[in-house]
Amino acid sequence: MRLTVSSTIADAFVRVFPASSWQAYVLKQTALFCGAALLVWLLSLTYGLDLSAGFF
């Protein structure tokens, strides 16, 4: 499921912006930065939370 969603998003980016476009580069870097920020935010939410098997 995730692979399908990822490939769909990648295909949409390729169609909107050509591969050598400066806009595509900026958009890619912005998306990577936002993804990293989201990951850090999610990790900070789970800080101190007991995620062991007994929790579930």
Image (spheres, helix red, strand yellow):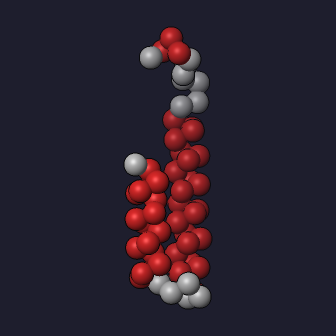
Numbered marks: total: 0
Q: Is residue 11 left or right of residue 38?
A: left
Taking depth in this image into account, of 5 and 36 the one nearest to the observer is 5
Give the quadrant of the C terminus: top left
Q: Position of residue 4 (x, y in %)?
A: 41, 56
Residue at image location 56% in from the left, 17% down from the top: 52
Q: Is residue 15 left or right of residue 28?
A: left
8 over 53 or under it: above or below: below
Taking depth in this image into account, of 12 and 48 the one nearest to the observer is 12
10 over 14 or under it: above or below: above
Q: Position of residue 20 (x, y in %)?
A: 59, 88
Q: Position of residue 51 (x, y in %)?
A: 54, 22
6 over 52 or under it: above or below: below
Residue at image location 52% in from the left, 75% down from the top: 27
Residue at image location 54% in from the left, 56% down from the top: 35
Residue 26 in which image quadrant:
bottom right
Q: Is residue 19 left or right of residue 10?
A: right
Identify the residue at the far top of this view: 54
Residue at image location 55% in from the left, 72% down from the top: 28
